Amino acid sequence: MVSLGLGRRSSDARMEVPRVNVVAIAILVVSAAIGWAAFTATGSRSLAIAAAGLALLLVPSPRIAQQWERAIVLRFGRFTGLRGPGLFWILPFVDRVSSWIDQRTITTSFAAEQTLTSDTVPVNVDAVLFWMVYDAEKAALEVQDYEQAVSWAAQTALRDIIGRTTLTDLLRGREKIEADLQQLIDQRSNPWGVTVSSVEMRDVVIPGALQDAMSREAQAAREKQARIILGQAEMEIAHSFQEAAKSYHDNPTALHLRAMNMLYEGLKEKGALMLIPSSAVESMGMGGMLGAAALRQQKLTGGHGEPSA
């Protein structure tokens, strides 16, 4: 069976999808027109048959590769070279395009389910691999299915990295893990003509019970830190009081002024009541100040009421 310029390609270099070859279709149309014109002019069927035979020979010859594609051409089963991009010709029934290699950046998602970390915690990790074919010849000849091989290499490398990493490093050190994972996959895929651009970890799922335990641990750590900060504040306040006491001990006048300020702040509101130890009154000389404060309070109340004992 002769293909009328309908080549086939694959997304994984094996399964192929139809591609329209306008050059082959044009050759077929022109050959048919020439044969029909020759048959109409001469009435000879041999010319029409010859034109049809020429069309059958020429139609499989032209091929078109897209800008990002390279065609692998085999001649009697032997590799003869790469073709493309653009229009190229092959020998009918002798040459064969075995596969079309896509050299654009390809994304492949992969995952590692129920994989144990180095501290025996089961995790599910989803990641995305960005890679491309830099050597189409190696991708076609060195491995049977380079896309599937890259996918399996990425998955096994991810399991290997997880098995050597603790859960804490897995959750906090993603950038380092992604770099190590890229390097490991690159080492395995370079012999196939494939290079890895980057690896991105999308999600890390841990068991629900462990999530609750980690949440309680984080809450306890925050409460501990809050208590530590409160204790440090109390120590700073006590230190400030100690320094103030030293200042007041060397300067009694400053202590009296502070006492007066305390009385003023406490009695400036109407109806305020302050309880002061008698020892403080004697040591700080606050008797006169208390009397003055009481007189001021009486004036403010308009002289009504009896003085308290």
Image (spheres, rainbow, N blue to C red):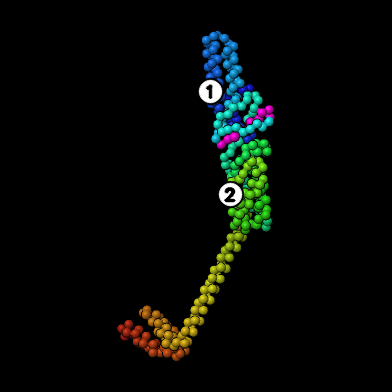
- Report the residue marked by disc 2: 200
Q: For numbered disc 1, what is the local secondary structure?
A: helix
Q: Residue furthest left?
A: 302
Indicate yes or no whether the magenta region holds residue 124: no
Q: Residue furthest front?
A: 80
Q: Callout 1, which amino acid?
A: Ala
Closer to the camera in the image, 57 or 248 = 57
Q: Callout 2, which amino acid?
A: Glu
* Depicted 226 relative to depicted 268: above or below: above
Identified at 32% across, 84% down, the residue is 299
Q: Report the side of 131 relative to 305 (left or right).
A: right
The quadrant of the image that shows the N terminus is top right
Closer to the camera in the image, 216 or 36 = 36
Q: Which residues are magenta?
A: 68-77
Indicate yes or no whether the magenta region holds residue 74: yes
Identified at 63% across, 32% down, the residue is 81
- The percent position of residue 9, horizontal first and vertical second, equals 60, 32
Which one is earlier in the sequence, the residue at label 2 or at label 1?
1
Per the model, the C-alpha gap separating discs 2 and 1 is: 47 Å
State which quadrant residue 305 falls in. Answer: bottom left
